Image (cartoon, rainbow, N blue to C red):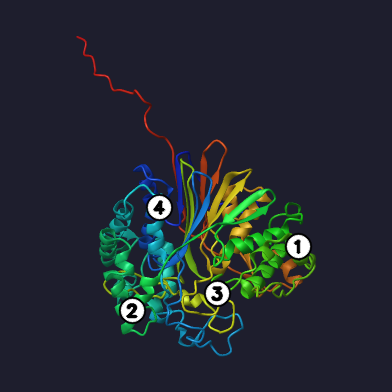
Amino acid sequence: MTPFDLDKQPAAGSRGMVVTNHPLASAAGVEMLAAGGNAADASVAALFALSVVEPMMVGIAGGGFAHLRLPDGSHTVIEGQGRCPAGVGPTTFEPLPGAPPASLETLGRRNAVGRSAVAVPGNLMAWCALLERHGRLPLADVVDPAIRLARRGFGATRYLAECVSDCAEDLARDPAIAAVFLPGGQLLRPGQRVTNAAYAETLETLVREGPDAFYRGPVGAALCDDMRAHGGHLDAGDLERYRISDMAALRAVYRGHEIFGPPPPCSGPLHIGQMLAILEKLPVRETGFGTADGVHLLAEVLKIAFADRVAATADPDFVSVPVERLLSAGYANERRQRIDMTRAQAWAAGVGPDTDSHTTHLSVADADGMIVSATQTINSLFGARYMVPGTGIIPNNYLYVFDPRPGRANSLAPGKRVTSSMAPLIVLHEGRPRYALGLPGGLRIFPSAFQALVNLIDHGMSLQQAVEAPRVWTQGGVLELEPGIDENTAATLAARGHDILRVNNVGGGMCAIGFRDDGTMTGAACWRADGTPIGVGGGEAREGVRFLPEVHRP
């Protein structure tokens, strides 16, 4: 028994599973599986659909990582992260005077809202590469559901309406985005029809011309012309120079489980592996889920990971990230020995370079053994909070993720990739896939994915329990607790020196798939978003089945 209730039910399937944070996107993915496509086709179709129905989280002008396990058992990562434009450098933005040392705020919010906040986007190129290299269906087929949804419209969920309300003041400043999400100058209501005809036309152009329409053609020209008119940094040269990267997956091991995920500049899997190495020699199961000791231990290892992340994790093209040191048993021992179970501590970085946010995630699997775990984003809610005129595209505000101060691991530099907390994971046990999972949530992504793994491996939870279980989060300041952590636990933690903050949720909606030895799959999504798992079962008729003509007897 677990000390919390479940809001949702899992789905089962034998021939495929699609789990995204919107039912219409999950349906778009399943449509591809039903049409003979594979997990790559389903993933790309779902991502394009999400750019319509979850536009506050993801879009073609964003960035992300797609982590694949192919039918032959190999892992690969397609990295399409945002990059700094050539015209951006370490002193482009002025840090907000008096802000805390870790703050990313700047004067005039120029790194957060508007054209000056936009990094060179990689999502569209990465999605098209994923489809071309690993899919079976043409681009026209996989984009078609998104075009239908943009042109015909869809009913706004309560979640979308609340996100619009949260950003309404910024959205209202841009006529194009306000026309879609603040119709008639009013807040979007749950159930209200949302259409984006301009985006449907943009997607049709992309189908005709491919990704070059964005990186070298008319769609990109519209983006750059608008940048030039409003003092943005991105130009046509930045788009033409952009390239995605193929990366080998990073591997960590915990209690006989292999955890694979993208390497830096994706920081999530690296620091998950670091935290699990610290826990490896501790009695986590015996400590119990949601207990004061259990939460205290999670909080201390989170603070350790965040201290090291700030000091050493960035784009490895610019900074030598100490991956082996962070994952080593020796370093885990050093950090573990300093944990005091009776009091909260402040942690400084134990490593350095060698000589948030709003996102979406999907987990997809097919009957042939392909698994896609992909996390994609435009960074903040509604990205830079404007729409490129005439295109329906909402650009990212990825420059907000960089440190606006010079001389730091994650300072701005031309061509530098965004450092991300994403954690699109695939977990194996005894050489076979067991879980694929991930979630949105900025700096709360990898701590939440880490807790899901602890729930599954140490606490023996079901997949549905693991994704819905109450979460905690800290990076060294306040300790955020979701409602499912009881008051007695909170009081004990406060007595140990933790600064407790009650929050409605930590991070976003987790999308996960569990794999059984018999080939069946379980899909699970949690209450923190509109997550919907859809499983595919059944199959074709047996060979030789016929409808015999009826015989009419007198």
Q: Give the SS element for disc 1.
A: helix
Q: Name the amino acid type tagged 3.
A: Phe
Please state which of residues 380 and 434 is positioned toward the viewer in this rendering. 434
The residue at which mark 2 appears reads as: 174
Q: Position of residue 36 (x, y in %)?
A: 36, 42
- 311 sits to left or right of 530: right
Give the residue pinned by disc 4.
133
What's the CA distance linking mark 1 and mark 3? 26 Å
- The single residue placed furthest to the front in the displayed view is 355
Mark 4 vs mark 1, CA separation in Å: 40 Å
Type of amino acid under label 4: Arg
The picture quadrant where one finds residue 33 is top left
Name the N-terminal-most of marks 2 and 1: 2
Q: Residue at x 73, y 68 (%)?
A: 493
Q: Residues within 10 Å of mark 3 (few under 14, many from 20)?
A: some
Q: How much space separates mark 2 and mark 1, taking CA atoms?
A: 53 Å
Q: Residues within 10 Å of mark 4 (few under 14, many from 20)?
A: few
Q: Which residue lies under the disc numbered 1?
A: 330
- Residue nearest the observer in this picture, 270 or 315: 315
Q: Nearer the viewer, residue 101 or 485?
A: 101
Question: What element does badge 3 sit on?
Answer: loop
Badge 3 is on which residue? 318
* Front label number (1 vs 3): 3
Relative image position of residue 117 (x, y in whole percent): 43, 79
Q: Kindly report which numbered mark, 2 or 1, lies closer to the viewer in this rendering.
A: 1
Check the image and report above or below for 34 versus 91.
Answer: above
Q: Amino acid at mark 2?
A: Asp
Q: Nearer the viewer, residue 270 or 230?
A: 270
- The answer to whether the residues at label 4 and label 3 have Cβ atoms under 8 Å apart is no
Q: CA distance from mark 4 to mark 3?
A: 28 Å
Which quadrant is home to the C terminus?
A: top left
Q: Position of residue 278 (x, y in %)?
A: 72, 61
